[in-house]
Amino acid sequence: MADNVLSFVVDAALSRVVSLITDEIMLAWNLKDDLKGLRESLTMIRAVLLDAEEQQTKREPVRLWLKKLREVAYEAEDVLDELAYENLRRKVEMQEQSGSEVNNFFSFSKGTRYVKKAALHVKMAHKVKNINELLNKIKNEAMGYGLQVVTKDRIMPQIDLDRVTDSVLDDPVVGREADVSKIVNLLNCSNDQQVLTIVSIVGMGGLGKTTLAKLGCQEVMEKKFFDLKIWVCVSDNFDDQRILGEMLQTLNANMGGLTNKDAVLQELEKALEGKKFLLVLDDVWNEVSKRWDDLKTRLVRVSRNTGNAIVVTTRSEQVASIMETSTHYRHTLNLLSDDECWSIMKERAFGNGEASIPLDLECIGKEIAKKCRGVPLAAKVLGGTMGGFERDKEAWLSIMNSNVLNSSDNKDNVESVLKLSFDHLPPFLKPCFAYCSIFPKDFDIAKKELVQLWMAEGFLGSSIQDEGNKYFNALLQNSFFQDVLRDEFENIIRCKMHDLVHDLALSLTKSETLTLENCTAGDEISSTRRLYVDRQNATTLIAFSKRDAKKLRSLFIKEIVFDGSWKLKRLRTLNLEGLILKSCHLQLAS
């Protein structure tokens, strides 16, 4: 799956080769033949990538070949970037020297410069030849595996980069009115004799548990059932100190840096004094009852009031059983009807103000809606993809007849829908989406910063920032982003990713991006190009060597103590938000 993004890396290296191959300085360095060899190997490899992608699940040697290619392709791009930099530096030096420097052939400084340039020439020539040999070997292996040049019979949507329908921005909820009423009633009936009443919302991923929790909590807060609402995304990391710390930060932003558990509890008790609170623990996976018991004990300790409530969203019945105070307070979210899925698809594809859809197209659309299997996320994503096809009947039929969407398992089917929609993205959007895997789950993504990160990584080419905004809109229209926040002028400033969409992004970059979600003890971090470290996975830095750091292109170190010395020659983006420097040396260039 990651090779959808690999093709972008190969294309970037190929583009760099083409721009260098006719350069006068490269000709003077006698690198023309080596660069031509690189172009030939990269062109051939690019042509068989599609065949390799389709065969990797059935042939282990092909999967390993792709893994090897990924590493060499990144190395090739790094070397070519370095070569382009040296090329530019030489041109600047030549301009500065012409007419301003006294021509003294025997001067010591000029002689020293000549020796350095000659050494650099030899060094770069060796690097180019080494990459050429590696790529030539990979090319020959591809031929040995019988990989063929194939073209996929796939109709690609014509994405309007300026188009964002109202349904994407407003994200109307379909078919959940009764569910919202049920949650409101459960919270209204919470036991005033108990300190905590637990209401659990259970259902598979993509059904809208988080959305339901938001709507239900919004209504009870409007009716003033509770004084305070606190929201914590728990995800895989059920750590009571983190949860309590985030609760405190929600109530008092100035207290976000506290790390001492007793101090956090003391401040939390002050903030909750005399208040009736509603706490939402979103996306809980923990099935260890002791962890929940520890958190519950501390929550009871910090609030002496009765009538507080906790809303838990989870995919696991076991989690609900562990956390809830009574099964009467459990709500299992059901699938939507096919008609409701079609309603979501239609709004996402065409918007609310569109003219009526031709009958034959509507019949096809309703058949496609059945493949959503009652999951609203699948309907949104498919609707975004269908919108790119507009009213192309042949394209709609190609989706309807796709074997990818025929899984009998609902979970697999949602993943298949997401993968299908990703496959139908234009090549220039795929690395932009995959890059978002560097953010933790439920991360509040700033649109402006994200576009700047894309620019730094080279995903926008020579385009200006406006083009990045259009890329963002296209991914939003395809439902890869959600929960948008707008300013007073209705401009989008922030967004989030659904956890299943985030899982897809992680699967695309699992060998290149190291974050909290995909960091395990057995990871091969030597191939990591992007690293995100915060308090929750700070131990990752211990295993990360100076040699590994040299390959990093993006580095995010947040709210931890860093004691290290790294040479970051390939770095394109650096974020040190909240970093505490104990003893740090980050060298950003040679």
Image (cartoon, grey):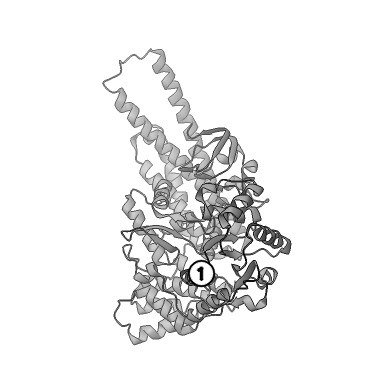
Q: Is residue 521 left or right of residue 489?
A: right
Instruction: Give 564 or 54, whichever is nearer the viewer.
Output: 564
Q: Disc 1 marks which residue?
A: 217
In the displayed structure, would residue 79 be above or below residue 223? above
Determine which quarter of the picture holds residue 232: bottom right
The answer to whether residue 193 is above or below residue 274 is below
Crowd class of label 1 (few under 14; some 14 to 19; many from 20; radius 10 Å):
many
Q: Is residue 226 left or right of residue 358?
A: right
| Badge count | 1
Camera-nearest residue between 101 and 226: 226
Q: Position of residue 404 (x, y in %)?
A: 52, 74
**Residue 581 in view here:** yes
Name the amino acid type tagged 1.
Cys
**Image coords of residue 214 (percent x, y):** 50, 68
Would you say residue 426 is visible in this rendering?
no
User: Where residue 575 appears, x then y in whole percent?
Assistant: 48, 43
Q: Nearer the viewer, residue 92 or 421?
A: 421
Q: Given the current orientation, which residue lies at the most extreme left position?
A: 99
Q: Residue at x 44, y 41 (%)?
A: 80
* Residue drawn at the location 43% of the way across and 26% of the way down: 117
Circle 1 SS class: helix
Q: Residue furthest right?
A: 290
- Point out the residue furthest to the front here: 274
